[in-house]
Image: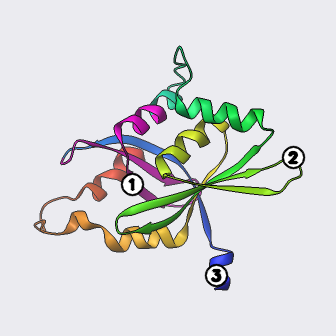
Amino acid sequence: MNMQSDPKMVEVKIGALIMDPNTNTPIVVLKGVESEAVLPIWVGAFEANAIALEIEKIVPQRPMTHDLLRNVIIECGLLASSVVVTDLSENTFYARIELLDKKGDAVFLDARPSDAIALALRLDCPIFVEQRVLDLSAASSPQNDNIDDDEQTPGEDWPELIG
C-alpha cells in the first residue's frame, strides 16, 4: 500500500498525434521527457481535434469545451499543478487533473486522459504517467494477438514517428 500512496511518476510530453490505420481512430502517443517511455492512448475524434488545435496554437472563434474549463479553473483561482495518467484497466486509461486552490490545498478531478491532456496543454502544466501504467500497457499490448512474426506491429513504428 505504501507504493500506492507514492507511485513512481514518469514525466511525458506529446510525441505524436497519429491515426491508427486499422481502426481509423486517433492515437496520442506520450513520450518520456527524460526516459524512453512510450505510451499510446487511443482517443476520440473530438478530443484529438482539441489537442491538435492547441498544439498548432489555433484559436477558435468561440471557446471550445476545454477552453471553457481552462477559463473556469483560472477564474476560480485554481492553479493546475499536473495531469497524471493513473490507471489502465480493461483497455481503458484513467487520469486525474491535479489543481491547487488559493490556500495551496490539492483538488483532484477524475478525467479521461484525452480531456486531461487537452487541458494540460491549455494550462501549461506537466503531464505524468504512473510507472505501473507503462508496465501494464507494455504487458497487455492486444495488437500483438494474431499477428504473424514477420509483420511489424504499430508499436515498433511509434519510436520512429516520435523520435
Decide if residue 162 is on the left or right side of residue 7.
left
Residue nearest the observer in this picture, 32 or 18: 18
- Which quarter of the figure has residue 74? top right
Q: Secondary structure at mark 3?
A: helix
Decide if residue 146 is on the left or right side of residue 143.
left
Q: CA distance from mark 2 to mark 3?
A: 29 Å
Residue nearest the observer in this picture, 45 or 76: 76
Pointer 1 residue? 40
Decide if residue 91 is on the left or right side of residue 78.
left
Pointer 2 residue? 102
Q: Nearer the viewer, mark 2 or mark 3?
A: 2
Residue at the right extreme? 103
- Which quarter of the figure has residue 8? bottom right
Residue at 59% across, 38% down: 121
Residue 118 lies in magenta, yes or no?
A: no
Q: Nearer the viewer, mark 2 or mark 1?
A: 2
The amino acid on which the numbered mark 1 sits, given as a three-letter code, is Pro
- Percent coordinates x, y for residue 72 in the rendering: 69, 34
Pointer 3 residue? 3
Residue at 83% across, 57% down: 105
Query: Range of the magenta residues?
Result: 22-51
Q: CA distance from mark 2 to mark 1?
A: 35 Å
